């Protein structure tokens, strides 16, 4: 159960290393990620797998913090276009946590995602909102609205 999951420094370090590897691949795919993506660690992470996803949602949102998840996939041609704004939102809102999630590694969670990218907003493990087929301005507006 999520409520019993705890983090260790080794697990957090491994998580950040995995996240940075995923972010590097995404940045390379976009030709260097215009606008730059921050390194994983602070308020940005990338997850692969249901266990890591559940642990991240629980750990980062347990104190009522906003968690913004960008669901995407390696094959998604539109996903890289939103990465610069996602990274900028992470820098603008250090009180929130931003998660890159690969739907192909999330069989349970991914089955409810109809479009990529999809952005979901969680607080305390509860989904507040979801947007698809969005623009950078719409993402900025939704993050601002939910972070306030």
Image: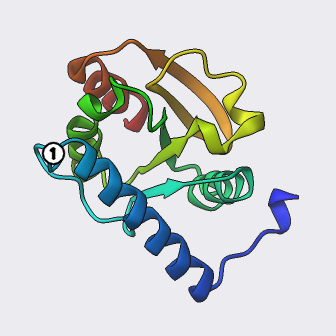
Say which element carries label 1.
Answer: loop
In the rendered image, the vertical position of residue 131 relative to residue 43, given as above or below: above
Task: Give the color scheme: rainbow, by chain, secondary structure or one colour.
Answer: rainbow
Q: Residue furthest bottom?
A: 10
* Quadrant of the image occupied by residue 38: bottom left
The picture places residue 129, in percent across and down from the top left corner, at 54, 22
Pick the front one: 17 or 9: 17
At 26% from the left edge and 17% from the top edge, which residue is drawn?
Answer: 135
Mark 1, residue position: 31
Quadrant in which the N terminus is drawn:
bottom right
Pick the front one: 81 or 123: 81
The picture places residue 72, in percent across and down from the top left corner, at 47, 33
At 64% from the left edge and 84% from the top edge, which residue is drawn?
Answer: 8
The picture places residue 115, in percent across and down from the top left corner, at 52, 16
Q: Residue furthest right?
A: 1
Quadrant in which the C terminus is drawn:
top left
Mark 1 neighbour density, 10 Å: few (under 14) some (14–19) many (20 or more): few
In the rendered image, the vertical position of residue 72 relative to residue 9, given as above or below: above
At 72% from the left edge and 50% from the top edge, which residue is drawn?
Answer: 50
The count of marks equals: 1
Q: Residue furthest left?
A: 35
Pick the front one: 102 or 128: 102
In the rendered image, the vertical position of residue 57 relative to residue 30, given as above or below: below
The picture places residue 2, in percent across and down from the top left corner, at 81, 58
* Quadrant of the image occupied by residue 80: top left
In the rendered image, the vertical position of residue 9 relative to residue 106, given as above or below: below
């Amino acid at each position: 159960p999520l409520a019993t999951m705890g983090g260790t420094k080794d697990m957090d370090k491994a998580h950040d290393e995995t996240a940075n590897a995923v972010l590097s691949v995404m940045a390379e795919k976009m030709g260097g990620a215009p606008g730059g993506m921050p390194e994983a660690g602070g308020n940005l992470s990338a997850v692969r797998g249901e266990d890591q996803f559940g642990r991240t949602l629980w750990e980062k949102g347990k104190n009522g913090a906003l968690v913004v998840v960008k669901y995407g996939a390696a094959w998604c041609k539109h996903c890289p276009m939103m990465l610069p704004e996602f990274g900028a939102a992470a820098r603008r809102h250090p009180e929130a946590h931003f998660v890159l999630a690969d739907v192909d590694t999330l069989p349970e969670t991914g089955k409810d995602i109809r479009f990529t990218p999809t952005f979901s907003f969680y607080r305390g493990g509860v989904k507040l909102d979801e947007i698809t087929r969005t623009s950078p301005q719409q993402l900025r507006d939704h993050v601002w609205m939910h972070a306030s």
